[in-house]
Amino acid sequence: ELRRDGIDLWPEAKDYLDKAREELDEARKIAAIGLAKAAARGAYFVAFHSAEAFIIERTGKVAKTHVGVRSEFARLAKNEPRLDKSFVAFLAQAYKYKEIGDYGVGGRGPPSASKKPRKPLRRPPVSSTA
């Protein structure tokens, strides 16, 4: 049983921390071979699963979405003096890198990453060779 400061962790929190450790090991291996986007995605999931464990420990509940994890973690972390506040910012920034790695195309991030509205896509003209 995993213990921290003499307190038993919820089994679900332990599972999330175990998953975070697995992700960390994989992200390090991926970074070592130079796959930056994949390593950044892995780093996000290390932070995500760690934050989920923190939320479970404080509330006894599992957040159901990425947004839910980030917002609940931020809410709970502000009242935890032992937790470095930079972790909240890291989780938010790492999510942006994960989103770009997952959905970015053509050197651009996903549409939600842009502040300016995009023009509708148009098909290129079809040339006829008759």
Image (cartoon, rainbow, N blue to C red):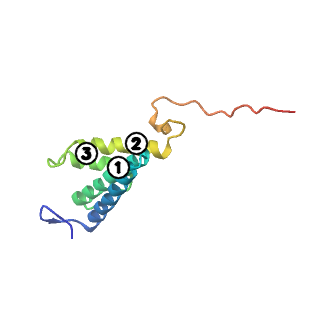
Mark carried by residue 97 = 2
Q: In the rendered image, which quarter is residue 5 located in?
A: bottom left
- Residue at horizontal 54 percent and vertical 31 percent from the top: 118
Please rate how many residues cluster around mark 2, counting C-alpha atoms within 10 Å: few if below 14, some from 14 to 19, many from 20: many
Q: Position of residue 69 (x, y in %)?
A: 33, 51
x, y percentage for residue 17? 28, 60
Question: Left or right: where does residue 10 sit relative to residue 28?
Answer: left
Pointer 3: what residue? 87
* Marked residue nearer the N-terminal end (1 or 2): 1
The picture places residue 61, in percent across and down from the top left corner, at 29, 60
Q: Secondary structure at mark 1?
A: helix
Callouts 1 and 3 close, C-beta under 8 Å: no
- Farthest bottom residue? 1
Q: Nearer the viewer, residue 130 or 13?
A: 130
- Say which mark, if any, is on residue 3: none
Residue at horizontal 25 percent and vertical 62 percent from the top:
60
Q: Are marks 1 and 2 in contact (CB under 8 Å)?
A: yes
